[in-house]
Amino acid sequence: MRDYPFIAFLTLSCFCAQLSAKSLTIDQLQGLDLASLLDVVVETASGTEESLIDAPASMVIITQKQIAQRGYQNLVEVLQDLPGFDVTIPNGPVYTNSYQRGYRLPQMSRTLLMFNGITDNLLWSDEAAISRQYPISNIQQIEVLYGPASAVYGPNAFLGIINVITKNGRDLETGEYTGEVNTLVGSFQSRGLDATVQGKPFDDLSFSIAAKVFNSNEADLSDRWGFSSNEQYSNSDIWGAILDFEHEGQQLNHYYDPTEDYGVMAELNYKDLELGLINWRTKEGYGTYYAADRVQNNLFWNRANAQYYAKYDTTLSEKLRSKSFISYHTSRYYGTWGEADPDGDTGYSYISLTQWNSVNESWLFKQDFEYQLSETFLLSSGLKYQRKHLTKAYDIPGYWPPSVSSTAEVSSGIGHSTDASYTTPATPADEMPASNLTHTYDVGGYVQGIIDVAPFRFNLGLRYDRNSMYGQEISPRIAAIYKHNKAWTFKLLYGHAFQEPAGVQLWGGWSGRLANEELKPEHVRNLEGVIMHQWDNIFHEVSIYNAHYTDVIKEESENAGQRDIYGIEYRLQSTFNNFFDAEDIDIYFNYSYTHAQSSLYYDFVTDDWLIGEAELGDIAPHKWNAGINMPLPKNWNFNLRLNYVGVREPYLRNALRGHRKIDDYYTVNTALSYYYQPFTVTFKVLNALDAEYYHPGSEAASAGDDFSQRSLDYQNSLIPQEGRSFWLNAKWSF
């Protein structure tokens, strides 16, 4: 274990602890100093406004000022500094996978990603497709909730919630306009533009619009892993005539991993009515996600998501509040796939270059009420109706059976690497064939009571959901909060949640992936204790939890086995007098211990899953994050962040399981900012010590590490990570 950065941080903390302490002002942290941290208003935990101390969950708040000080440029960087998240970056069609509280999955599909309470997960896979597409300049704060929340939100609030609260023109004075423009350049020929504008031209009318574009060639990792080498990408025995093709001006014979992402968010507010949109697309190469002897990475895979919505939030009487919401949501998955499927042990391949498509849409209506029965009793309830129109299977003209093929015969796009030429099949039809669409509906409702009897607060919730595919579910939640005094708070939390089977696993199978229309939802029962302690300039929080998961949906699209996960999360925040003539110094430290156990294990001899207790894998038992922010004289600011991830056992299905572990690593990230109003310039270095480290592969991660022969399967077992990178951001605020 490399513990010298940990020792360095403890030394620094002890040094700072000897300084005389004082509290920050609200202005210094834009409304969130340590003295008022427990009183900050959140809405994610209960769907109603309450203080952090009253929320029936363990939560982490990331402020606008922290985002600026740390130089965050995207949500992925935020996730890497959070406790309880195992973040992997395959840098491919799925840019990042984040496993919250030890629940390893093929994709990040068990955590809800929300913007102002609006779910932005993709419709077909339930995936939170977090990449570089979201405008950071538009974020007011980020509320991260840990643990199940189906009692309020219904399906898929399974492991937790990331709720991004954006800036709102309603908060401005009449006639006031503000904005922010960020320009970004960095390593790997990366460049980006991120801008937000808010205004309030009239008393009852306001708006906010934000946009971001990000382009990059990404790091060249071809020499870091044998199954990502240019030797394999250019091997004519493997790829044959596929090597004659180009994509975006680049020959398909070498590692090239481009990214072109964008996102737009907008709101128009008139009195109690809000109209808005969330629209983004990720367009990214395949990176090191797949083995180079099976998939060409120099092709684009796209995810496109768009929501158009209306909110009407009004007070009907002194005690009654109504919140109405309606949205139209579309999700599309599409792109080009270049494949070389081994032809036995001959060294040659069956080759194909095909276009894939999936289109999905939904209509959603929600109506919520809050009724303040008395000073001590708040009753809230809500109803939901959602209608989805989903693609059943990818439309892949010319691909292997049993794929759907709208414009070409099945298998017509399959060639051989010994053929003199290759002809690409037709692209998918403009509209998905009706025979390949299905329709589902969800109805649900909940009731929640919040009772305050000092020094106690109780939150009791019960939800009923019914789906046309998998039937009915009931989700209870019970929370008891004891506020001993101003310093100590104790929470005892119990909740159920369920995860609906995703369309991609119900119907979206093809020759390389199974589908199963008989899938049932996953379930979790979570018991958790939280201790919060505020003492002068130091805030501590400890969470101890145990989660029992049943009907687990494995990557083979079947309900099989159980998982038991228990863990401890410790969080520390503190401020100290600065020994320079500048604002106070901030430090934080997070530690996570996670133990994830499966009731099944994979036997590589029999090539089958068997019953037996085993460590799940890909989850680091020990992780910590630490950071210090030091304002400097003459408008400078220095930020230092350390992340440590301990040794990991590979996932149960990973070909490295049993003979190779995933080494521990630490990274150091720095940001130096200079403020000259209205301008800010930030120079950031990621992985400043140029550590060489690997993340575990995604899905089955079963390609192996014997580079003297063809890979064992498609997904790489280990993913090399970027080395040191440099970033320059110039911000203009007006």
Image (tube, rainbow, N blue to C red):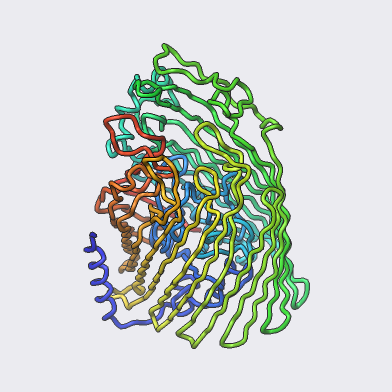
Where residue 458 appears, x then y in whole percent?
A: 61, 79
Give the answer, above or below, for where 148 lies relative to 295: below
Where residue 333 appears, x then y in whole percent?
A: 56, 38
Closer to us: 500 or 223: 500
Closer to us: 472 or 570: 472
Total number of numbered labels?
Answer: 0
Q: Is residue 349 left or right of residue 20?
A: right
Query: Is residue 116 visible to the viewer in this orientation of the structure?
Result: yes
Most distant residue in the top direction: 420
Where residue 471 appears, x then y in whole percent?
A: 69, 53
- The quadrant of the image that shows the N terminus is bottom left
Residue shown at the point (62%, 67%) measured from the top left: 173
Query: Is residue 164 visible to the viewer in this orientation of the structure?
Result: no
Closer to us: 597 or 436: 597
Most distant residue in the left direction: 4
Give the answer, above or below, for where 671 lies relative to 88: below
Residue 115, picture quadrant: bottom right
Where residue 624 appears, x then y in whole percent?
A: 34, 64
Give the answer, above or below, for where 161 lies relative to 570: above
Q: Is residue 523 left or right of residue 634?
A: right
Residue 575, picture quadrant: bottom left
Residue shown at the point (31%, 58%) measured from the top left: 646
Closer to us: 477 or 206: 477
